[in-house]
Amino acid sequence: MEVGMSTTAFTGERQKTASETPTKLTLLPLIALVVGSMIGGGAFNLPSDMSRQASPAAILIGWLITGVGMLMLAFVYQGLAVRKPDLNAGPYAYAKAGFGPFVGFNSAWGYWLSAFLGNVAYAVAIFSALSHFFPVFGGGNNLASILGASICLWLIHVLVLGGIRQAAFVNIVTTVAKLVPLMAFILAAIIGFNWDKLAFNFWGSGDAQGVGNLGSILTQVKSTMLVTLWVFIGIEGASVYSARAAHRSDVGRATIIGFFGALAIYVMISLLATGVLTQPELAAQKVPSMAGVMEALVGRWGASLVNLGLIVSVSGAFLSWTLLCAEIPYTCGRDGTFPKWFGGENQNGSPAHSLWATNLLIQAFLLLSLFSKSAYQFFYLIASVAILPPYVLSGAYALKLAMSGEGYADGDRARNRDAIIGLVATLYGLWLVYAAGLGFLLMCAVLFAPGILVYAKARAEHGERVFVGYEYVVAAGIIILAIAAAWLMWTGRLTPFH
């Protein structure tokens, strides 16, 4: 069965007969995939994550940059879904079509890394929230938490193996349920907002003695970039499932609707919190920091509500990302970019092999989280950096199409508009690479290096050369960076688990 026709795969349906039509995803489930993927644990910890090294002014500038950059990326996915209807699985397919099989593989590999590392962060966040009710779970990454997270991981594994239709329904329910505590927090924060607290040390310059000095505005804004990227990961969720959309145009609509809804929620959460607690107080809050802010507003019951909301929200996001990150290796295994083993299905049409590979890796990194002092922050930052190649390459592919005119009619005025959109999206992605810093880029190279062996096996299965042309340079660069990272970690100058 061709990949582009694999609409019965991962739907929980038997193979269709000539008289049957496979169930497709309509606009509401696609919006739920986008919103459910984006609004997870990150939203509930925005007050401290954004304020840890940034003033209210820097937070505003950070959201402005992110809003423009992510809107352009949303437009990229909206446009490509319509202009390239033959390309499915979102970022991976666009990178492969535009820049060759090895670059496409690394886009898929990065997306997969980001997805399962994000799930590790989600698991830590869930059990950190549960510690509000059951102190035995501590910070969310002690032994009790790892055991609990492992049980949840394999329960979701069984659910997804039963088929996407059942899982997508659960995702819609959790997406709606998670919005209740977020809206309650926003309402309470509006009522309890104190303008003087927002205005105090607005630029983060501190007093004459340097107390409260957070550094230059550029440094402060850079500190917010991976946080804002983290909460927007999933914006391409509908694009990944474009082959399963009932109407291709719904992919773009779901992406834009999900983006604006999430942006409004994120900006209000992070800015309103600065009018309730001071920057040092926000920075000192534990995961989820929104609970501490809510407790200051209405008392302990407010913290309980937020913690319950996070548990529901992150459980839904965990499910969404289990669906998304299983789809990429499955599709890659079907078209030869990954070894064909990853394309294996079970009797329900679910991508069983890619699910097993994904969840075994999540399990391994859950165990590694025992050695991290700030496991949630570490894993979401690595997940944010890992997804940068897919995002940068998506923008670059849209720019390439607009510049070359491929897929456009003669005189189509949309070319100039799409070229600007693609350029801004690409520059935004490159800015994020700069903002991430060398340390996280080096650590990501260590995770990308093993992918070369996976890619080589896939090429060998089809009797093809592993690399051609500039792909040798790309592979050499990844290996050199990975070796440098390993050396720095060995000498103690780079600490992966801090």
Image (spheres, rainbow, N blue to C red):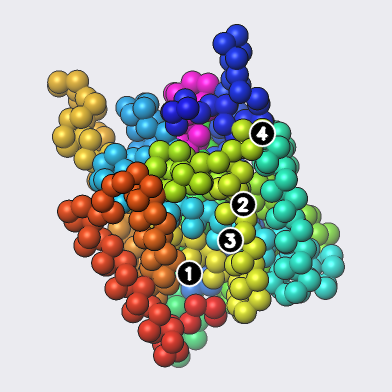
Q: Amino acid at mark 4?
A: Gln
Q: Nearer the viewer, residue 165 or 418?
A: 165
Q: Read off the residue under disc 1.
A: 55
Report helix, strand or loop for mark 1: loop
Q: Which residues are magenta?
A: 238-252
Residue 307 visible to an observer of this rendering: no
User: What is the spatial separation of the Cα atoms under label 1 and label 2, in whole angstroms?
Assistant: 43 Å
Q: Amino acid at mark 1?
A: Ser
Q: Amino acid at mark 3?
A: Leu
Sequence-wise first label, 1 or 2: 1
CA neighbours of label 2 inside 10 A, class few (<14), some (14 to 19), many (20+): some
User: Is 242 one of the magenta-colored residues?
Assistant: yes
Q: Read off the residue under disc 4.
A: 347
Q: Which mark is residue 356?
A: 2
CA neighbours of label 4 inside 10 A, class few (<14), some (14 to 19), many (20+): some
User: Is 459 one of the magenta-colored residues?
Assistant: no
User: What is the spatial separation of the Cα atoms under label 2 and label 3, in whole angstroms?
Assistant: 9 Å
Q: Position of residue 370 (x, y in %)?
A: 66, 76
State which quadrant residue 198 falls in: bottom right
Picture layout, residue 394 above or below residue 245:
below
Magenta stretch: helix, strand or loop mostly:
helix
Q: Read off the residue under disc 3.
A: 361
Q: Which quadrant is the C terminus positioned in? A: bottom right
Sequence-wise first label, 1 or 4: 1
Marks 3 and 1: which is nearer the front? 3
Marks 1 and 2: which is nearer the front? 2
Q: Left or right: where does residue 255 sit relative to residue 28?
A: left
Report helix, strand or loop for mark 2: helix
User: What is the spatial separation of the Cα atoms under label 3 and label 1, in whole angstroms?
Assistant: 37 Å
Q: Are marks 3 and 1 in contact (CB under 8 Å)?
A: no
User: What is the spatial separation of the Cα atoms under label 1 and label 4, in whole angstroms?
Assistant: 54 Å
